Image (cartoon, rainbow, N blue to C red):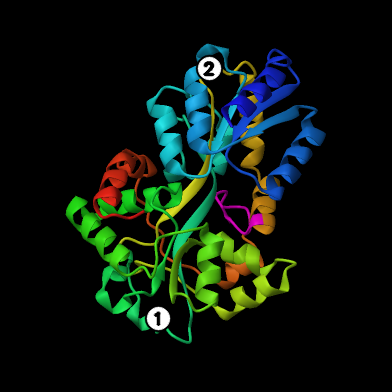
Amino acid sequence: MIKKLALCAVVLASSLFASNEVNVYSQRHYDSDKIIYKKFEEETGIKVNVITAQAEELVAKLAIEGANTPADVLITADIGNLYQAKKRHLLQPIESKVLNENIPENLRDPDNNWFALTKRARVFVYNPKTVNPADLSDYLSLANPKFKDKVVTRSSTSGYNKSLLASIIANYGEEKALAFAKGLVSNMPYNPKGADKDQIIAVGAGDADIAIVNTYYLGVMLISKDKKDQEIAKSLKIFFPAQETTGTHMNITGAGVTNFASNKENAIKFIEYLSSIEAQEVFAEANQEFPVNPNAKASQIVQSWGAFKEDTISLNEVGKYTKKAVEIATEADWK
């Protein structure tokens, strides 16, 4: 993978000083993004060059490249890696009236190093034939022994679960976070495997009753051309946790201008466009994510899930506890 990234970097380096380009390191791999990039190119004449890889790889790559990086923009699918990129001085603060107007304050870095582009709610997807929603409450409730062999989720190494556990630490403290992690592991029917979609399929197949996943995975299955995916998704229900306490954990996709961006102005224009109503509604329709721009509409599927209370804790506060989350997950033997 590193060799592949290095080769891509050489290709990007040839256009390092081109004023009509913007070079993007992105963790995202969705068709929605390709649609948006094409629209941006058509409207601005600025060509978008993209390297995709896991967020940890891209952050490490930026650190190694330093001032020689061809990247102008970093996009990651979770707050943890944006926090690390800022902490390692790989991003730079920018001033943008457009971003300040399009993105609520709690979804922007206080120092303007990163800006949220979409929101993801981490929820329970459950089998209504085997689970009474009255038995569900907050995330900590899934550690209850009554859910023995009933709960599945992906590995603790997933950015989504690291951020979820970090938010639990921030909200409840390390002791309760550890008790949650240990109880969750005890209630898993097998060691974690696969991505969020695999957890949903496992519940649909009867291998578990409850999955901890991001909502957009279920949304994408509902609009899938694969009839089997649709049938599974339609047979299950969503539960938004912690409505009586902290609110449902919200992670983000976010972007920042790299510290050594050679095309800074284009990078700012690019992120501004990603925050526009036009781009936000493509994210919403094609990938079933929650828009961050208050003036953009969520998809009909997302709207059908109804309003819910979101956890509004500072995302930088969540990012701060990501390392501790890894330690706690390891102690709990959460694979």
Name the residue nearer the viewer: 123 or 158: 158
Residue at the outermost bottom position: 129
Could you tell which of marks 1 and 2 lies nearer the N-terminus? 2
Decide: few, some or many residues near mark 1? Use Cα within 10 Å; few <14, some 14-19, many ≥20. some
Q: Position of residue 83 (x, y in %)?
A: 40, 35
Name the residue nearer the viewer: 23 or 130: 130
Residue 65, numbered circle: 2
Q: Is residue 152 above or below residue 259?
A: below
Query: What element does badge 2 sit on?
Result: helix
Whether the magenta-drawn stretch holds residue 211 is answered as no
Q: Amino acid at mark 1?
A: Pro
**Quick check: 9 left or right of 213?**
right
Residue occupied by mark 1: 133
Do the residues bearing badges 1 and 2 touch, measured as CB atoms within 8 Å? Answer: no
Q: Position of residue 213 (x, y in %)?
A: 48, 62
- In magenta, the rendered stretch is 287-297
Q: Residue drawn 44% across and 37% down?
A: 81
Instruction: Single out the mark in the foreground, 1 or 2.
Output: 2
Query: Gap between marks 1 and 2, in whole Å?
Result: 50 Å
Decide: few, some or many residues near mark 2? Use Cα within 10 Å; few <14, some 14-19, many ≥20. some
**Quick check: 280 left or right of 132?**
right
Q: Position of residue 166 (x, y in %)?
A: 32, 48
Q: Image quadrant for the N terminus? A: top right
Q: Residue drawn 60% across and 43% down?
A: 28
Residue 99, numbered circle: none
Q: Position of residue 177 (x, y in %)?
A: 24, 55
Is residue 296 among the parts visible in the rendering?
A: yes
